[in-house]
Structure formats: C-alpha cells, structure tokens
Image (cartoon, helix red, strand yellow):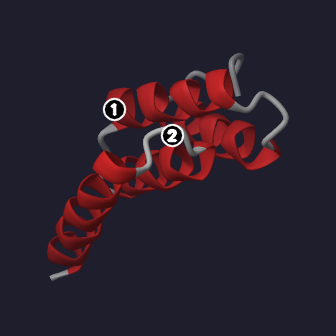
Amino acid sequence: MQNEKFDEAEALLKKQWDSNQQKAWQHKTEGKIYLLKNKLEKAEKALMEGIEIDPSFFSLYTNLARVYSKAGEFEKA
C-alpha cells in the first residue's frame, strides 16, 4: 500500500518535471521518494543533480547523507 503512494508521487513529480526541470527542490523530492523506496542509486543521482543546480540547498546534502548511511557508506555520510 505504501509503495503505491510512492509510485503515485513519483508519477506526479515526473509530470511536473517536464514543465519545470531546473528546480533543485524537485531533485530533492525525487531523491527522497527513491530513498523511501530503497532505490539508493537513483536517490543519489537525483540529489547530486540537485546539488549541481543549487549547491547551497542544504536539504539535498542531508538527504544524500541519509542515502549513504542507508547504503552503509558511513564515510561518505
């Protein structure tokens, strides 16, 4: 049931993505969805893309640390 909600959120985000690609918060949201779905490589990629757009967006780094922690890569976290 919970994964269905994540799938729905992911689909809605992708739809919005087409109209407004350069928003770092969209990368944060996408990364968070992938993190919650345990798709860690996709989460890392989305968050890193957000950091490229807005390196001052602290929340991207926080979520990236969560990805690394969940992956057991504590030295990166």
Above/below status of 62 relative to 55 = below
Residue 56 quadrant:
top right
Label at residue 42: 1
Label at residue 75: none
Q: Residue at x 24, y 59 (%)?
A: 15
Q: In the orientation shown, which residue stands out farthest toward the front?
A: 19
Above/below status of 71 relative to 37 = above
Point out the frontmost of discs 1 and 2: 1
Q: In the orientation shown, which residue stands out farthest toward the top?
A: 75
Q: Residue at x 72, y 36 (%)?
A: 61
Measuring from the top left, give residue 10's x and y in whole percent.
26, 60
Measuring from the top left, give residue 11's x and y in whole percent.
19, 62
Q: Amino acid at mark 2?
A: Lys
Measuring from the top left, give residue 77's x and y in whole percent.
70, 28
Q: Which residue is mark 2?
A: 70
Left/right of residue 76 with respect to residue 8 in the rendered view: right
Q: Residue at x 71, y 17 (%)?
A: 75
Mark 2 surroundings: few (<14), some (14-19) or many (≥20) residues within 10 A: some
Q: Amino acid at mark 1?
A: Lys
In space, the residues marked 1 and 2 are separated at their CA atoms by 13 Å
Frontmost residue, 30 versus 44: 30
Frontmost residue, 59 versus 70: 59
State which quarter of the image contains the N terminus: bottom left
Measuring from the top left, give residue 23's x and y in whole percent.
57, 45
Disc with the residue nearer the chain's start (1 vs 2): 1
Task: Tell me if residue 40 can be seen.
Answer: yes
Above/below status of 67 relative to 29 = above
Q: Are marks 1 and 2 in contact (CB under 8 Å)?
A: no
Residue 65 quadrant:
top right
Local SS, label 1: helix
Above/below status of 67 relative to 32 = above
Q: Residue at x 47, y 29 (%)?
A: 44
